[in-house]
Amino acid sequence: MLPRSLSLTLLNPTWSEEPFPPVDIAWVEPNGLLAVGGDLSVARLKNAYRAGIFPWFGPREPIYWWSPDPRTVLFPERVRMTRSLRKSLRNKGYRITFDTCFAEVVDACAAPRAYTSETWITHEMHTAYCMLHAHDIAHSLEVWNPAGELVGGLYGVATGGVFSGESMFSREPDTSKIAMVALAWHVQHWGFKVIDCQIENPHLMSMGAENIPRSAYLNILHNHLHVPPPRYWVADPNVDLSRWEPQPT
């Protein structure tokens, strides 16, 4: 239940181009809650990500919009690769692709996990991000095993030089980590500045994610809004990620 002592901006569901309120009025607790309502149209989602805002809500809840402080990010050149992860990359024959089955990746991310049957990726969210994908704004990365099975991946939103990761999944050991390493290598080589992880969790922090002030994240975002996206989201089949030593370009 939301505290009664605080007000919350109510967005108009019929005005997709409606400006968002300034993020510095977002709540401290829960961290980053900024607005409620509106819709999940392509126009509104695009405006949200350009302002450092994202939707996050559960089944049977209204649409909540967030801009937390601090912000969890992963600088591609700081991604952490363990010896066991390098071994998996070297020996298990995984193949990386982009955008070959976006909807299937979102389905996999929404599937029940070992620790919970709940998901925030509702049918409404699934539809919205598939629409972003159709507009070349959202992208997926897939990890395939030698049998041709989809065993890991992630999806997110590209905004200039920032890639906002929305969710990831793993069906075999290390495959979500492999997806993140592959994403980091490619977006760094395509000129992206940072991977936005939004909110910290142990998995992301173990891979090198860090918390930075929201103001610092917004400076990065706004200074790189006009970085041109890659013409084609295609994985480089020649890169050996097991030998990659991340470092600034």
Image (cartoon, rainbow, N blue to C red):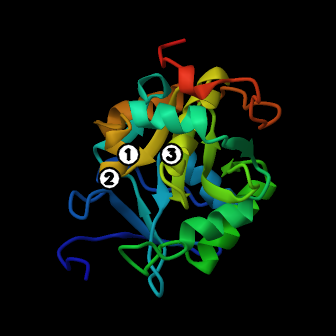
32 vs 224: above or below: below
Q: Could you say whether the residue bearing mark 3 is in a helix, strand or loop?
A: loop
Q: What type is the residue that disc 3 sits on?
A: Ala
Q: Position of residue 42 (x, y in %)?
A: 70, 60
Q: Report the side of 199 relative to 27 (left or right).
A: right
Marks 2/3: CA–CA distance: 23 Å
Q: Which mark is residue 201?
A: 2
CB atoms at circles 2 and 1 under 8 Å apart? yes
Q: Position of residue 213 (x, y in %)?
A: 29, 36
**Residue at the far bottom in the pictured view:** 60
Taking the spot 53% from the left edge, 39% from the top edge, the residue there is: 88
**Mark 2 or 3, which is nearer the eye?**
2
Which corner quadrant of the image does residue 31 belong to? bottom left
Residue at figure coordinates x 62%, y 40% from the top left: 159
Residue 204, disc: 1
Q: Which mark is residue 104?
A: none
Q: Earlier in the sequence, mark 1 or mark 3?
A: 3
Assign a secondary structure to mark 2. Answer: loop
Report whether 31 appears left or right of 139: left
Q: Residue at x 46, y 80 (%)?
A: 62
The residue lying furthest to the left in this view is 5
* Secondary structure of residue under mark 1: helix
Q: Residue at x 55, y 61 (%)?
A: 171
How far from the left and from the top, in percent, is residue 98? 74, 44
- Eyeballing the image, is 105 above or below 4? above
User: Dot 1 surroundings within 10 Å: few (below 14), some, or many (20 or more)?
Assistant: some
Q: Amino acid at mark 2?
A: Asn
Q: Is residue 148 left or right of residue 160?
A: right
Can you give x and y, in whole percent of width and height, for residue 207 in the image? 38, 38
Q: Which residue is mark 3?
A: 51
